[in-house]
Image (tube, rainbow, N blue to C red):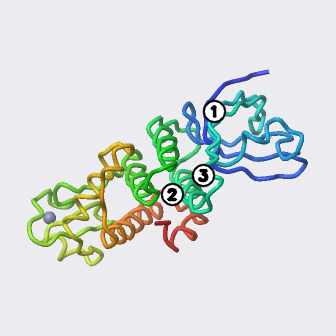
Amino acid sequence: MKLYKMEAIVLRARDIGGGDKLLVLYSREYGKIKVIAHGASKPSSRKRGFVQPFNHTKFLIQRGREIDSVSQCEGVEMFSFIREDLKKIGYASYLAELLDALTPEGEPNEFLFALLLETMRLMNNGDDEILARSFEIKCVGFLGYRPVLDSCAECQGQTGGRIHFSSGLGGVLCEACASADREAVSCDRGVVETMKVLLSWPPVKLRLLKVGRPARNQIKVLLRDYLKYYMEHELKSAAFLNRFTQGPPG
Ligand SMILES: [Zn+2]
């Protein structure tokens, strides 16, 4: 009987009949992984409380021929403050779905694991909307698609005067390059500066960041388009895209 340990956050949990649950976990050791938790839907199950979405749990997993299964589990953090607040449930569900949509199975990325954990912890008394934007931009950055914000993404020149953003070209554009890209949208320099901060500051420091409503709205749209472009070209995660196109929270 082959057993292995891991520490993971539950992204999704679905009843699959017979009292069993199919879990999608994001683990520190193995990245995204799907496992079965036998009997976890039954009221008497000791696993039940530890396999709910957003839980941070330690697992002992048993290898199976088709799918691995939970042998034992032990809760580390329950995130009850998320579960008690509908708005926070919405944000946490979005973070979990985004990470699920952006990552393939079995590719560990400790930065992404730590980012999700830290972002959820900070939701206890942080700015959920800013934390979600920071999560979005850092996620694509950790996956190798960091938007270029310091110079023109196309010609590497300085971006003086009016500044533009192009999802297709991967960042900000100078005026000359923007005039050749029909998709480029004009944006405020302050918005670009805020996006740099969202990308580079650790989430815990973001409480010092003050962002007005117009800038929040513009960043939300820019990042939504950027992520959508990335997902359509890289992942084609259709189910999430449909939900996502209606707009991420915030
Ligand atoms: Zn340029």
Amino acid found under the numbered disc labelled 1: Val
Mark 2 vs mark 3, CA separation in Å: 29 Å
What secondary structure is marked by label 3? helix
What secondary structure is marked by label 2? loop
Instruction: Say which residue appears at 61% left-offset and 44% top-offset.
Output: 79
Indicate whether 83 appears above or below 222: above
Indicate whether 150 appears above or below 248: above
Left or right: 111 in relation to 59: left
- Label 2 neighbourhood size at 10 Å, few (<14), some (14-19), many (20+)? some
Amino acid found under the numbered disc labelled 3: Ile
> Reading the chain from its start, which is encountered first: label 1 or label 2?
1
Name, please, the residue furthest toward the top: 1
Placement of the N terminus among the 4 image quadrants = top right
What secondary structure is marked by label 1? strand
Amino acid found under the numbered disc labelled 2: Leu
Horizontal and vertical percent position of residue 133: 40, 58
Disc 3 target residue: 82
Disc 2 target residue: 235
Asked whether 34 or 14 is in front, the reply is: 14
Label at residue 76: 1
